């Protein structure tokens, strides 16, 4: 971190400040932080993973030690160091502000293991400040669960890993409905019958992907046959069984001719939340199912009914 970092916080763009205020993220104005290290230890085998945030160079490293059974390694451990990311000054400020807001810099020094627990794992957190002081915390089969859960999303935003806690997929990936293909004598259902196309979800996004190219280059597990009537069945019976997703506001099902220009567009369904809907399938078409949410988030899935 540059030593005058916090003198420039007020010069951040209006967009960033507005975003922070909307999510109630506070601005850290304490002693500048030079580095943050978080190490986890697996008691069953002794392997360790240490994440090192160097805020002077704006770099993130992962140091791993795993047991080795090779006699060439006297200490019986193999060390691997990987540079995971070089982050921007803006990303650094955003991360530190979130960790400050969520309380990471004020957790207790020691979280002792509950009585009777011998295996499991431990962790060590070290925050180094520009004045030479350090914040050191540790835990054994115990942690500030709420603080770590919130901070995990902040870490995930910058490196795709929760580091201090698991981040559930509903934070970074949009939901889906259940899919089935129904003929006169068969019902075949699987969530993998479609491929994801474009989405905006919780500030994560994947945009400008070609619907046609995805259909051209993907393998679909269901095969369509001529002269066999088939329906697409969508349902939301399992929508929230595993993850806690908010309901979509609108579902739009659209078909196109199977070509690069996606000609002959037809909107087959355009309505709100449903329990189950059924749509007749035409062959040699590309289908897109789009789910839209109140906050502007959306996700698109696709499949095709090409007769091979």
Image (spheres, rainbow, N blue to C red):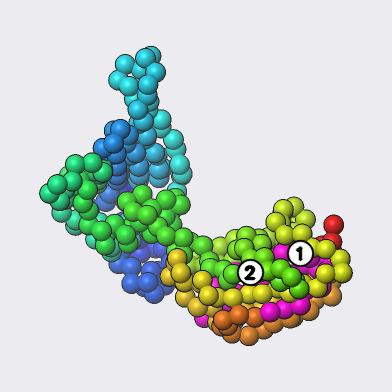
Instruction: Estimate the x, y position of residue 233 in percent, counting from the top left.
Output: 66, 74
Residue furthest front in the image:
185
Is disc 2 in contact with disc 1, using a CB cutoff of under 8 Å?
no
Looking at the image, residue 246 sits to the left or right of residue 72; the answer is right
Mark carried by residue 179: 2
* Res 190 visible: yes
Name the foreground residue: 126 vs 50. Answer: 50
Q: Residue at x 62, y 63 (%)?
A: 190
* Res 260 visible: no
Residue furthest top in the image:
72
Looking at the image, residue 34 sits to the left or right of residue 254; the answer is left
Q: Is residue 173 above or below residue 67?
A: below
Label 2 or label 1, whichever comes before in sequence order: 2
Q: Which residues are magenta?
A: 278-305
* Distance from the alpha carbon under mark 2 to that under mark 1: 13 Å
For label 1, the residue is 304
């Amino acid at each position: 971190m540059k030593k005058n970092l916090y003198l420039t916080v007020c010069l951040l763009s209006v967009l960033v400040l507005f975003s922070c205020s909307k999510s109630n993220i506070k601005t850290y104005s304490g002693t500048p932080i030079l580095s943050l290290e978080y190490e986890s230890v697996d008691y069953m085998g002794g392997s360790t993973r240490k994440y090192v945030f160097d805020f002077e160079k704006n770099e993130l490293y992962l140091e791993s030690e795993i047991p080795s059974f090779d006699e060439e390694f006297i200490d019986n451990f193999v060390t691997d160091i990987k540079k995971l990311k070089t982050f921007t000054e803006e990303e650094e400020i955003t991360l530190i502000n979130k960790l400050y807001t969520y309380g990471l810099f004020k957790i207790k020094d020691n979280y002792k293991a509950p009585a009777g627990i011998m295996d499991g794992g431990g962790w060590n957190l070290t925050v180094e400040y520009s004045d030479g002081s350090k914040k050191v915390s540790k835990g054994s089969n115990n942690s500030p669960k709420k603080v770590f859960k919130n901070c995990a999303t902040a870490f995930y935003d910058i490196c795709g890993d929760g580091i201090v806690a698991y981040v559930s997929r509903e934070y970074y990936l949009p939901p889906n409905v259940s899919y089935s293909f129904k003929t006169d004598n068969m019902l075949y259902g699987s969530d993998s019958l479609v491929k994801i196309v474009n989405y905006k979800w919780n500030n994560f996004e994947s945009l400008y992907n070609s619907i046609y190219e995805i259909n051209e280059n993907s393998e679909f597990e269901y095969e369509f046959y001529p002269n066999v009537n088939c329906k697409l069945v969508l349902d939301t019976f399992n929508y929230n069984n595993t993850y806690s997703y908010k309901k979509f506001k609108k579902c739009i099902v659209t078909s196109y001719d199977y070509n690069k220009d996606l000609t002959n567009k037809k909107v087959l369904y355009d309505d709100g939340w449903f329990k189950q809907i059924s749509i007749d399938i035409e062959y040699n078409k590309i289908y897109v199912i789009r789910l839209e949410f109140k906050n502007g988030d959306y996700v698109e899935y696709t499949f095709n009914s090409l007769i091979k």
